[in-house]
Amino acid sequence: MGSRRKFLKNIGITLPVITILGAQACEAGVDSALVEKKKTTPIKPVVISTWKFGFSANEKAWETLEAGGKALDAVESGVQVPESDPNVSSVGFGGLPDRDGNVTLDSCIMDETGNAGSVAFLQGIKNPIRVARMVMEKTPHVMLVGKGAQDYAVAEGFEIEDLLTDKARTRWEEWKTDANYKPEINVEDHDTIGMIALDKHGNLSGACTTSGLAWKMHGRVGDSAIIGAALFVDNEIGAATATGKGEAVMKTVGAFLIVELMRQGKSPQEACELAVQRIIKKNPDSKNFQVGYLALNKEGQTGAYSIQKGFTYNVFDPNKKEQTQADHYYETDVRSY
Ligand code: SD4
């Protein structure tokens, strides 16, 4: 028995009685005006995404949202902008490789019905988000990894391409000279795109895609492929996405935590702040890495917060091509570790 029904039963009121009472209230013109207002107010679409490429990615997503398209289509097309751009060294084609020189990609996507798809440790495929969506829509699974994900992409018509650009190869060769095999977090070089959107139908979706931490161990998978960690969408409540040190996000299931905090009544901003505080509480070394969160609720309100200064994001406004600096926990401007 549903909890509302249970509650009503416990207080001795049955549903038809409540319905009649509700109808009387409506007749009195109290609720019906509000309900009517809600029905007739057009929903303003919102798209928000991480880092400096956020504006151009959001601009692409906006084309779909403005035309009345689905948030899912918007986020899928939006995040492909940095995925396809060889000058973005942290997402898709042109991404910095792992310590052995392999570009390995993590992506995930989630729609308004709670469906999710993901690929991890995928090599040679330029737009992993498209593969993630196919995993979601065309397979009985949520996640494919490595060679299996690549075989699946090829079977769906994707070409295998060399994703390591000359620029990225040079950076890798330079990095190899000091043979420091410790993966680095540098908030400028390893920026993931996480994008969440609300469409005119009032539906939420999200996408997240990255080449992950540069110089990572071969085989390492980060949060950007993990539903609940770097991305979570619950169409009743809101959506959240993450960037930064994936290990810290995974261990606190960050995006899911934010959505659950919003479910408990927190605003998107409060939820992002609490999720960052959770990481700080659990990680004595939190001064040495970056995590940034974005959140969006059903009402179109947004939130953003990070551990360190320097996390920028874009809430799309066609008239304002500017990034916003997220509020952050530590005052020091820590950029490279
Ligand atoms: C990862 N979260 O692979 C990604 C990297 C990232 O800003 O977002 N950097 O852990």
Image (cartoon, rainbow, N blue to C red):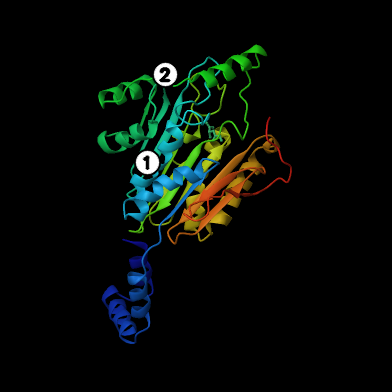
170 and 289: which one is in front? 170
User: Within 10 angstroms of label 2, few (less than 14), some, or many (20 or more) residues?
Assistant: some
Rendering quarter of residue 57: top left
Q: Which residue is mark 2?
A: 162
Give above or below for 263 relative to 88: below
Q: Which residue is mark 1?
A: 77
Residue type for callout 2: Asp
User: Which residue is at 47% across, 20% downward?
Assistant: 164
The answer as to whether callout 1 falls within 8 Å of ligand 1 is no
> Which element type, helix, strand or loop, lies under badge 2?
loop
Q: Is residue 298 left or right of residue 88?
A: left
> Which element type, helix, strand or loop, lies under badge 1?
helix
The answer to whether residue 230 is visible is no
Q: Is residue 12 left or right of residue 334?
A: left
Residue 286 placement (x, y as % from top left):
67, 38
Quadrant of the frame with the C terminus: top right
92 and 305: which one is in front? 92
Q: Label 1 to label 2, Cα distance in Å?
A: 22 Å
Quadrant for ligand 1 reads top right
Give the farthest residue toward the front. 319
Give above or below for 121 relative to 118: above
Quadrant of the frame with the N terminus: bottom left
Give the farthest residue toward the bottom. 28
